[in-house]
Every structure is written in C-alpha cells, then in structure tokens.
Image (tube, grey):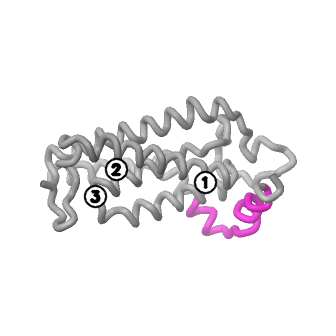
Amino acid sequence: MSLEIALFDLINKTLTHPWLTEFFVFFTNVHKTLFFKIGFSILLVFWVYKCKWNVGKVLLSIGLVVGSADAFSYRVLKEFIERPRPHHIESIQSEMRLEYGPKSASFPSNHATNTTALAMTVAFFYPFLMWPAVITTVLIAYSRVYVGVHFVSDVLAGILLGSLLGFLWIKFVFNRFEFFKKARLSKKNTEPK
C-alpha cells in the first residue's frame, strides 16, 4: 500500500500544474460537456451518411462491449471488493479536483474499464483509429488519478479488465459472425465492404 500511496501522491500532488489541472478535469468529464454532445452528434450523422448500415453494427458492438464491461466492473467487482476511493481515506489527503466526489467504490476504475473496452472495439472495426483510441484511454485513466478519485492500481485493473472483455468479445463474437465481420473496414482501403 505504501507504493500505491506514493504513486498516487506523485500524480495527484507533485506532478501538477494549473493548466494540467484544467486539461485533466475537462478530459475526465468530457462526456458530460455540451461540446462533446454536439460534436458527437455531428460526427454520428456524418458517420451514418458515409458508412450506412454498418454503423448500426458497430454501435451495437460498442453497446455490447461497453455495457458488459460497465456492468461487470460496477455491479460485480466494485460491490464485491468495496475499496474506498482516495478522497474517502482521511490519512491520504487526496487533492480532490472535481466538483463532486464519486460515492461508489474505487476498484476497478469504470472510466478505465469502459474506455479500454471501447478503444478495443473501435480499433477492431476501424484499425486506423487504434492509436488515437489508445492515447485517449491512457489520458482518461491518468486523469482519474490526477483528479483524486482513483489509485493507480484501480486504473491499471480497469485497463486490464477492459482489454480482457474487449478481447473476448472480438475473439468469440465479432470474429466469428459475418454480421459483425462485414462492418469491419478492410486493411487495404478505408471504405466499408
């Protein structure tokens, strides 16, 4: 636990700067912003126009993977492990950088689990988006420690869990059924089949 606290203190209290704080607070909550909602809606309309019916298959796949990851992480692991968050432990004196303090348990991080599962699904269907998806996942995972609501092991466990669940969906469902395989962009071109 001493290594865990040392890593948390390094990220949450030492490696900080006002502009980093603004960036990571925004990034950890980007899904709640009007900018994201409008931007995502515009992107979705363009995506549907460009890729037609395959978008529905990809969205269904994302819903299945992220939904199962979120449910397993939140409803099973968090409730079974019941690890307190850093800002719930008085002796740690977490530098809380959010207006709200999540009340749920800490382990594993749902943000890390869900974004990793999402990244794997997106990279499966659109291989050219693999690196942006990985970078986004790492930034979100790091932001959860930076803003003071998770330990490093919470986000690492979330990344591992999201990777495992994404892998299982890809291997046993998406790679086995033509319905999903047809929605995948070929490696030779950027147009759906």
Q: Are marks 3 and 2 in contact (CB under 8 Å)?
A: no
CA distance for labels 1 and 3: 24 Å
CA distance for labels 3 and 2: 22 Å
Where residue 174 sits: x, y (%)?
A: 29, 44
Residue 56 visible from this viewpoint: no
Q: Earlier in the sequence, mark 2 or mark 1?
A: 2
| Label 2 SS | helix
| Label 3 SS | loop
Q: Which residue is mark 1?
A: 156
Query: Magenta: predominant secondary structure element?
Result: helix
Q: Residue at x 61, y 52 (%)?
A: 155
Q: What is the quadrant of residue 81 in the picture?
A: top right
Query: The disc labelled 1 sits on which kind of residue?
Result: Leu
Q: Which residue is mark 2?
A: 38
Which residues are the magenta region? 5-24
Q: Which-is-in-front pick, marks 2 and 1?
A: 1
